[in-house]
């Protein structure tokens, strides 16, 4: 039995919206199509909520939802993925935040220049790592593999 435990804050917010919400949500109870429609209509009537949620939805997904709407199920595309470990950031340095910001700004600018998408940038005990995707919608190109290589070389 798979269950998700919500934080007390989230649980209380959900309970305020729906008196039947409990502290645990069963993942196996997927909403029916009627329930999904009701939830989508509720979201559509609250544009400020949509704007807030959009900040957490990747651009390729937003693009597909704009173009295909609620009928979009899945999309399989050839993409080129670029993984990079950034060794120029020293985690023991006093100015690690500035080094990380400079590395992020440089890479984000170059990835944008070659029309890629920064998919992840993380700093943890394994070091600073990023990966970018070249080819997800709405920025598909015939030469996405070439763009990824040129971007990597310039970085």
Image (cartoon, grey):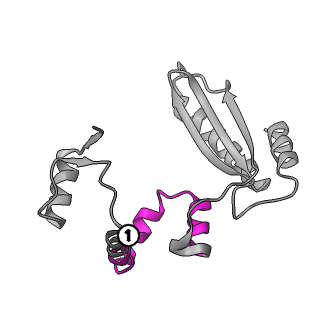
| Image quarter (top left, top right, bottom left or bottom right) of the C terminus | top right
Image-quadrant location for residue 66: bottom right
Instruction: Please state the horizontal and vertical placement of residue 98, each as a whole percent of the image.
Output: 56, 36
Q: Is residue 63 above or below residue 101?
A: below
Q: Residue at x 67, y 24 (%)?
A: 87
Q: Is residue 80 left or right of residue 102?
A: right
Q: Is residue 126 above or below residue 155?
A: above
Q: Residue at x 86, y 43 (%)?
A: 150
Q: Residue at x 81, y 44 (%)?
A: 148
Instruction: Please state the horizontal and vertical placement of residue 10, each as a whole percent of the image.
Output: 22, 52
Tag 1 secondary structure: helix
Q: Which residues are magenta?
A: 40-66
- Return the residue nearer the eye: 72 or 147: 72
Image-quadrant location for residue 6: top left
Task: Give the main secondary structure, helix, strand or loop, of the magenta stretch.
Answer: helix
Q: Residue at x 60, y 73 (%)?
A: 68
Q: Which residue is label 1 attached to?
A: 33
């Amino acid at each position: 039995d798979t269950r998700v435990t919500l934080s007390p804050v989230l649980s209380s917010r959900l309970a305020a919206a729906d008196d039947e919400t409990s502290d645990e949500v069963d993942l196996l109870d997927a909403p029916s199509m009627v329930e999904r429609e009701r939830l989508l209509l509720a979201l559509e009537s609250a544009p400020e909520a949509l704007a807030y949620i959009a900040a957490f939805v990747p651009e390729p997904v937003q693009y597909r939802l704009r173009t295909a709407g609620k009928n979009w199920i899945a999309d399989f595309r050839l993409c080129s993925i670029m993984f990079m470990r950034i060794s120029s950031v020293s985690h023991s340095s006093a100015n690690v935040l500035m080094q990380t910001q400079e590395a992020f700004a440089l890479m984000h600018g170059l990835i944008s220049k070659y029309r890629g998408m920064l998919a992840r940038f993380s700093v943890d005990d394994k070091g600073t790592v990023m990966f970018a995707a070249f080819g997800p919608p709405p920025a598909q190109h015939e030469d996405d593999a070439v763009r990824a290589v040129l971007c990597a070389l310039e970085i």
